[in-house]
Image (tube, grey):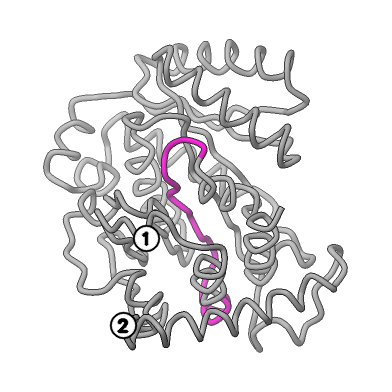
Amino acid sequence: MHNDQAAGLRAMQSSTTELEGMEEQTEQSIPAETRSKNAKPVRVIAVASGKGGVGKTNVSVNLSVALSQLGNRVLLMDADMGLANVDIMLGIQTKYNLVHVLNGEKTLVEVMADAPGGFKVIPAASGDTRMAQLSPAENAGIINAFSEIDAFLDVLIIDTAAGIADSVVSYCRASQEVVIVVTDEPASMTDAYALIKVLSREHDLTKFQLLANMARSEEHGKMLYDKFSNVCEKFLEVSVDYLGTVPFDHDLREAIQKQSPVTLSKPNSASAKAFKRIANDINKWAIPNDATGYLQFFVENIFRSQNN
């Protein structure tokens, strides 16, 4: 084994030992000594979809911009291990990514990159099969690194991979809110239902937010939500709230081609205004003021979900 990889694994084994110790704590509270000195509540949002091609990463990027514009300190984590594309959407080049954290070469802070719009990005490694198949100990080691940044963060957005891979389930279970992105395609709706079914029946998640993307209009998006939520609530013991609709306009298509968030390049476009409305609604969500609002709780839940 490469020396750097060996060092990284030893560090993560140590992190895993610490996380195992947390399992003995109550789920209701995590003692202050397990948090970083200046820890503060952080809003953690997982953005997921049943299938690829529905604009999930574009949603994550533009919500990050819009939430930053509201005064939040936002961190966007590209959690699509193996097919990362947040940096492509933003038109930025990054020197380091999560592989360097895994290998023990860099800290999480050192791999964070500045993104247009005033937020930070944690890049993943595109095309790295090892990153797409992390062991529980390796994944826990990466997530545990978040404990060093919670004092400097208001919102953490997790751009998950599409589908129902173990990593997607882990990030969704650990987050406070799960946003499901759908489009008006049978495969998108069917796969989104399958994702919610897995998360609810096998992992006890009961609350979801639905965002209709690339819709013809607000009315069209609301119709998709009504149809989808009725089926979910009829056959699954879950509640699905309507987060909003983003129309697919010419400005959005142009922004994607230019690798620039539409909220920055065309702030007065219909799609940009929709992202801003949704961000305003998210900004009004209550932040848990107990242990569930801290990144340490997010870390613990990641570890627990991978061992259930």
Q: x%, y% of residue 165?
A: 50, 42
Total labels drawn: 2
Name the kind of residue labelled 1 in the image.
Met
Q: x%, y% of residue 49?
A: 46, 34
Q: x%, y% of residue 237?
A: 78, 25
Q: Residue at x 53, y 61 (%)?
A: 155
Label 2 Cα neighbours within 10 Å, binned few <14 / some 14-19 / many ≥20: few
Q: Is residue 199 left or right of residue 103?
A: right
Q: Residue at x 36, y 64 (%)?
A: 119
Q: Is residue 83 left or right of residue 155?
A: left
Disc 2 element: loop
Q: Nearer the viewer, mark 2 or mark 1?
A: 2
| Residue 10 vertical placement versus 48 (above, below) | below
Give the distance between the C-alpha atoms of the residues marked 2 and 1, in whole angstroms: 16 Å
Q: Nearer the viewer, residue 133 or 61?
A: 133
Disc 1 element: helix
| Residue 277 vertical placement versus 187 (above, below) | below
| Residue 257 vertical placement versus 136 (above, below) | above
Q: In which quadrant of the rendered image does the N terminus lie?
A: bottom left
Residue at numbered disc 2:
2
Q: Residue at x 19, y 46 (%)?
A: 265
Instruction: Point out the stretch of residues depicted in magenta.
Output: 147-164
Q: Nearer the viewer, residue 1 or 236?
A: 1
Residue 131's disc is 1
| Residue 146 vertical placement versus 61 (above, below) | below
Name the kind of residue labelled 2 in the image.
His
